[in-house]
Image: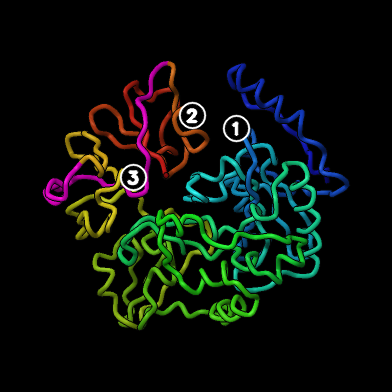
Amino acid sequence: MTGLRGKFSAPPRRLGCLALAAALFAATASLGAISVLDTYYSPRNRERPARGSTRFIILHTTEGRSRGAGAKLSRRGEAHYMIDEVGRIYRIIDQRRVAYHCGRSMWNGRTSLDNCSIGIEMAGYHNRDLTAAQYRALKDLLTEIQAIYGVPDERVLCHSMVAYGAPNQWQRRSHRGRKRCGMRFAMTSVRARLGLTAKPARDPDVTAKRLVVADPYLHRVLYSGSATEQAQAAAKYLAKETNVIGPGRSAWDIARDEYNSADTVYVLPDGTRKNGTEIVNWRAIPRGTKVLLSEGDANPPEQVRTLGTTGATPASVAGDESLSATTIYVLPDGRCLRGNTLTAEIIAAMPTGTRVLVGYKMDGPITSRRRAFDICGPCWQEADTFYLFPGGTLMSGNTVDAGRIPRGTMVLFKN
């Protein structure tokens, strides 16, 4: 058991980065008398860089019991803290380092919120209340972290507020509603018990039309003007939701971003079983199909779609954002094009074998003086970051050898 300040050893970096880290850490005070457990202290700590700023605290729910969740969070380094059902606080990633807890995220136009936030996981579910012990522990933890980093109440957000999804078979535009994670932390009654007296009145990215609302009930939970309206909207999620496809309930409604994962299994009414990568026509899935969601380490949803395979077309892959700067086309000859540099006619004539990534930035090239980390930061080695080598080979960040990435390689990473 240790205090929240904990142990920290800076990763090897250039002297400028070390100086910045030293200045940041010197300004970080001990988190008072709160004790934390290192049971799930992640081996990923040594490879995570220092976080440049801390503007937000993001609250999550594990959607499972603490024991299994803690092991997974530790293995992947997916949070800074976890609080179990009896109020014990566990440190996962040192609070001054980057933890990968937000995924594709945006708030007020700012993306990649992992780089400027602390993530706290609560053992439990998005549609169930915390235990009294969890309320006490989380309130104490928030008080300490907010005091150290100067994070105001209105920037203590839940994951469902900041997560967003790229276009898919059901949503034609980038949208809110990718996650329901932690949604109850937006409720006035819950925030009052945590000592939070302010919250966002609206979704700034929906207001600015950067995103659209894909789950109106969730939107009401997050932003309704009265506690009564919030409770009425949240009631939709209180009952155990069926995982059976039927009228008004699609694969996306059930599985969200995991709908096309290899670890999501569809059991058709005739007993046939298919995983998410084997479905061709999503709108033709018969009613009564049961969706089995993985409770372990799921493979990430398919990030790269290839035109001409499993019926993929620009419209089915990118929806209304086929001409967006964040839709990237990798042609069979190795050329890499942004959607906003093309016309609808050119996109419609894209050759079979063109690979498409939606909701991505493209930057580079890598040179002797500009490394992968310099281009995309701590996500450089993640499975959903891709490297386009000269010649057209596309490799995932978790498979590349950092010392052998050739000069001229472009980096494609989530926006």
Residue type at mark 3?
Thr
- The structure residue drawn at horizontal position 36% and vertical position 78%, both measured from the top left corner, is 289
- Front residue (pair 87, 190): 190
Q: Are marks 1 and 3 in contact (CB under 8 Å)?
A: no
* Residue under label 2: 373
Query: CB under 8 Å between callouts 2 and 1?
Result: yes
Left or right? Give the position of 32 relative to 219.
right
Q: Which mark is residue 216?
A: none
Q: Please say whether residue 188 is visible from this viewpoint.
A: yes
At label 2, which amino acid type do we have? Answer: Phe
Q: What SS does tag 1 mark?
A: loop
Which residue is labeled 3 in the image?
Answer: 326
- 202 is within the stretch colored magenta: no
3D distance between C-alphas at marks 1 and 3: 26 Å
Instruction: State the image coordinates of residue 321 (x, y, percent, origin top left).
Output: 29, 53
Is-magenta flag for residue 359? yes
Q: Looking at the rendering, which quadrant does residue 121 occupy?
A: bottom right
Q: Which residue is mark 1?
A: 49
Examine the rendered structure and indicate whether residue 105 appears above or below residue 7: below
Q: Residue at x 47, y 50 (%)?
A: 104
Is 351 on the left or on the right of 25, as rendered? left
Q: Nearer the viewer, mark 1 or mark 3?
A: 3
Q: Which circle's residue, 1 or 3, is located before the other in the chain?
A: 1
Residue in the picture at 50% in, 56% down:
204
In the foreground, 314 or 69: 314
Q: Pinpoint residue 84: horizontal percent, then vertical percent.
A: 73, 61
Question: Would you call the spot at circle 2 few (<14 residues within 10 Å), some (14-19), or many (20 or more)?
Answer: some
- Magenta-drawn segment: 342-368
